[in-house]
Image (spheres, grey):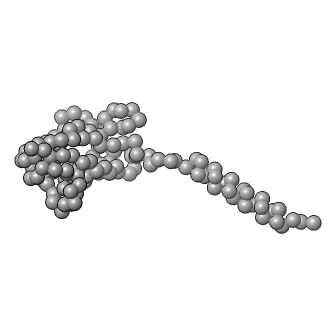
Amino acid sequence: MFDFAAWRVFWIVLGFIGVGAALTFSPSRNALDHYTFELVDREVKHGSGTTILVRLVDERTGKVVPDATLFISRLDMSPHGMGAMEAPLEPLPDTLPGYYRFETDLSMVGGWALTLAAKLPGEADPIHHRLVLQAIQ
C-alpha cells in the first residue's frame, strides 16, 4: 500500500534541506562591505578654507583604493539635528591615489556629517558612506 504521509514528510524534509543549503551558500556580506571611506583627521578647524581629507580603503588588504569616481558629496550638521544646515563642499585635485580632498566653509563648531557615494572600478554597484567629523575652534 502507498503511504502518502511518508511521501509528504519526505518532501518537507527535502524542502528544508534545500532552504538550508541555499542559506549556507548565500553570501553573508554585501560584496562592497569591505570598502570604506575613512577620515584622515576627525577634527578640523571651523571657518573658511577648511580642508577635509578622506581615504578609500579596502579593509581586506588595508590598502587605499585609487580611481574611484565620487558622484555624491554632502556636508551638513545632521549629527546635531540640523540636517538642513549644509556647508559648501568643493572637491580638490587629488595629490595621492586613493585620497580625496575637499575644501569647505564650516560656519559653526560641532559635529558635521560628510556623506559620500562613489563608483569603484570593476564593481557594479556604488558604495555609500557617512562620516562624522568635528569642527573645533
Label total for image:
0
| Foreground pick, 123 / 47 | 47
Quadrant of the frame with the C terminus: top left
In screen coordinates, is 73 left or right of 124? left
Question: Residue at image x 31%, y 35%?
Answer: 64
In screen coordinates, is 61 left or right of 73? right
Q: Quadrant of residue 34?
A: top left
| Foreground pick, 90 / 75 | 75
Query: Residue 72 in the image: x percent, y percent?
Result: 25, 53
| Foreground pick, 65 / 130 | 130
Q: Residue furthest left?
A: 48
Q: Quadrant of residue 83?
A: bottom left
Quadrant of the frame with the N terminus: bottom right
Query: Residue 69 in the image: x percent, y percent?
Result: 27, 46
Q: Quadrant of residue 38?
A: top left
Question: Residue at image x 34%, y 49%?
Answer: 127
Residue 70 visible at all: no
Query: Residue 6 in the image: x percent, y percent?
Result: 82, 62
Question: Residue at image x 50%, y 47%?
Answer: 28
Query: Residue 117 in the image: x percent, y percent?
Result: 29, 51
Residue 83 in the image: above or below residue 51: below
Question: Residue at image x 58%, y 51%?
Answer: 23
Residue 12 in the image: above or below residue 125: below
Residue 68 visible at all: yes
| Foreground pick, 79 / 87 | 79
